[in-house]
Amino acid sequence: MNQSDLILNVYKVLGLGGASFFAGVALTPFLTHLLYKYKMWRKEVRTHAPDGAPVPIFQKLHGERETNVPRMGGILIWGTTLLIALLFWVLSVLVPDPLFFKLNFLSRGQTWVPLSIMLGGALVGFLDDWFVVHQQGAYQGGGITFTRRIILVIAIALLGAYWFYFKLDPLYHTLAIPEVGSLTLGVWFIPFFVLVMLAVFSSGVVDGIDGLAGGVFASIFAAYAGIAFFQNQIDIAAFCAVIAGSILAFLWFNIPPARFYMSETGIMALTTTLTVIAFLTRAVAVLPIIAFPLVLESLSVIIQLSSKRFLKRKIFLVAPIHHHFEAIGWPPEKVTMRFWIISAVFAILGMIVQLMTRV
């Protein structure tokens, strides 16, 4: 890559990320108008966790705002990403200018599938949010049951695994481990892909305090934008930058007091997309580092549920762990900002580990 190409690629990635942020900010008044007009929030406070246990501490911490702050704020994230992708694709087709051709980041080899997976995850999450708002569904408070959501996530993962295994170079079927080398997975790649997507999906519990999920996911996608850029996967880098920009636009209105919540339509879009991006950049091994706060959140829930079942006692006052910190007296803003710091530090660390091993 010569210097002029490098400069153009920097402009492309950063410029599209900036365009996504400003587009998201501009679209927010329209989205919030609709969410408040149609009262897209829970009508009753949650009384039970997915495992059926009562949640008195959670009700004390967040019960009041659950019933007057809209869900579905995640529409802003995937909606802005889709808008920017389609806008610059249309401009590249209709306007015969090298600039618009360069700015188009929709490509079959790099971004078609992650964008499709994002929309699939967003749709499943949107349906869950819709049922919650309208109190339809099989569990208390409405929504798609946890088991059915798992099945739908597995279906999305299988579609992604099929594309990777049958449509891409066998190089993508291997697991690149820093300082070790590549581990050939063969047909085991398919269940491995599904397990990774399920693991990332489980981290969606991070969406529990104003501003928390937005700050964490912004750092994660920014790190993968950097990894993709230095691996010369410019369209993926631009795609991640656009997602990060749209998350920052969402975060602008989600910091305390939040105007809306990300909820399942945003969380499922981001977690499913993150899985695909990690495999496309062959940076799955560093995903637990880059997404360390997500790992921490998932583990806290697993530990809590296991301890309650086998030891008949709780390890944390309440899980996931960010609510535990609230329960012991930390203000929500302190929890959020400390998670942001941890997320930024580990995102940079994971990016460094990935790039050093590919030099």
Image (cartoon, rainbow, N blue to C red):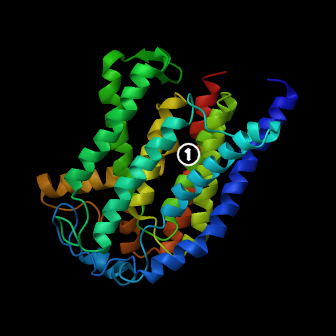
Residue 261: horizontal and vertical position, in percent? Answer: 45, 70
- Left/right placement of residue 16 relative to residue 358 reads right
Residue 116: horizontal and vertical position, in percent? Answer: 47, 42
User: Quadrant location of the N terminus?
Assistant: top right
Q: Is residue 226 visible?
A: yes
Give the farthest residue toward the right: 4
Of 290 and 267, the residue lying toward us: 267
Which residue corresponds to the image point at 29% horizontal and 55% vertical from the top-left? 301
User: Quadrant location of the C terminus?
Assistant: top right
Q: Is residue 348 visible?
A: no
Residue behind mark 1:
346
Residue 351: horizontal and vertical position, in percent? Answer: 60, 37
- Left/right placement of residue 269 relative to residue 17 reads left
Give the farthest residue toward the front: 94
- Left/right placement of residue 353 relative to residue 305 reads right
Question: Which quadrant of the view contains residue 139?
Answer: bottom left
- Left/right placement of residue 146 relative to residue 343 reads left
Which residue corresponds to the image point at 36% horizontal and 31% vertical from the top-left? 193
Of 107 and 247, the residue lying toward us: 107
- Mark count: 1
Name the kind of residue labelled 1 in the image: Phe
Q: Secondary structure at mark 1?
A: helix
The relative height of residue 289 versus residue 244 in the rendered view (above or below) is above
Question: Which quadrant of the view contains residue 153?
Answer: top left
Q: Residues within 10 Å of mark 1 (few under 14, many from 20)?
A: many
Which residue corresponds to the image point at 45% horizontal and 58% vertical from the top-left? 266
Of 256 and 33, the residue lying toward us: 33
Residue 225: horizontal and vertical position, in percent? Answer: 63, 41
Which residue corresponds to the image point at 47% horizontal and 50% vertical from the top-left? 270
